[in-house]
Image: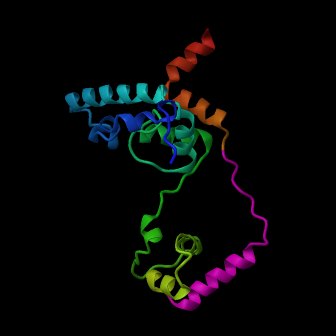
């Protein structure tokens, strides 16, 4: 088993109490609570400093903006800042549907094709009958979705172009450090 060196280790791993603090997990405190605002600002500054020195910062930021809808303070950003960065880049990240991946059945709803395929991909060892029971539908419905996926395999799909690392870093600078980017342009 390989162990990562401290140079490859994420800053958040070394200080979980900071990055999992309740004030960094949710939205910013309301205007009336100045003590919580002050504490949140201090925690945010400490976490941002740790992220800035982290060797995994760029990868973490890219993944948090482009690939996953994560909660809390990640890669030097709050959830609100990541939303602004995504808007600036034109990126849309869907929240993970953990219920579907776990096979939770919801009553009386239309099955989504992608949902069936995700469940099949997450559980390749299960029979189609078991998947049908987990989704609360008929076996023929599952088979129809599997046929549709096989037939669509030959079709060419246009994929959304993901932003480059440079564009993500530029959007980060514009959202998180807008005054610094303006100062650099003036200088």
- Closer to the camera in the image, 109 or 12: 12
The range drawn in magenta is 137-162
Which quarter of the figure is the C terminus placed in?
Answer: top right
117 lies left or right of 177: right
Would you say residue 168 is visible in this rendering?
Answer: yes
Q: How many marks?
A: 0
Residue located 67% across and 39% down the image: 164
Residue 150: percent from the left, percent from the top? 71, 78
- Closer to the camera in the image, 173 or 179: 173
Residue 14: percent from the left, percent from the top? 37, 34
Residue 150 part of the magenta-drawn span: yes
* Res. 133 image quadrant: bottom left
Residue 3: percent from the left, percent from the top? 49, 41
Residue farthest along the top direction in this orientation = 187
Residue located 62% across and 15% down the image: 185
175 lies left or right of 160: left
**Whether residue 149 is situated above or below residue 65 in the rendered picture:** below
Residue located 66% across and 42% down the image: 163
- Closer to the camera in the image, 150 or 40: 150
Residue farthest along the front direction in this orientation = 1
Would you say residue 27 is visible in this rendering?
Answer: no
Q: How is the image coloured?
A: rainbow
Residue located 44% across and 39% down the image: 74
Residue 80: percent from the left, percent from the top? 43, 40
Residue 41 part of the magenta-drawn span: no
């Amino acid at each position: 088993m390989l162990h990562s060196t401290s140079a490859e280790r994420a800053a958040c791993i070394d200080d979980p109490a900071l990055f999992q603090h309740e004030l960094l997990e949710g939205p910013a405190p309301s205007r009336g609570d100045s003590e919580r605002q002050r504490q949140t600002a201090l925690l945010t500054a400490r976490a941002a400093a740790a992220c800035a020195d982290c060797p995994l910062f760029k990868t973490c930021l890219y993944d948090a903006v482009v690939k996953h809808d994560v909660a809390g303070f990640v890669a030097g950003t709050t959830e609100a800042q990541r939303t602004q960065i995504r808007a600036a880049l034109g990126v849309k990240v869907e929240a993970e549907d953990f219920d579907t991946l776990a096979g939770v059945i919801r009553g009386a709803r239309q099955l989504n094709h992608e949902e069936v395929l995700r469940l099949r991909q997450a559980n390749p060892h299960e029979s189609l009958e078991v998947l049908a029971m987990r989704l609360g539908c008929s076996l023929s419905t599952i088979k129809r979705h599997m046929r549709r996926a096989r037939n669509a395999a030959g079709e060419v799909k246009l994929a959304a172009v993901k932003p480059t690392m440079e564009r993500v870093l530029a959007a980060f600078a514009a959202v998180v450090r807008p005054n610094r980017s303006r100062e650099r342009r003036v200088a």
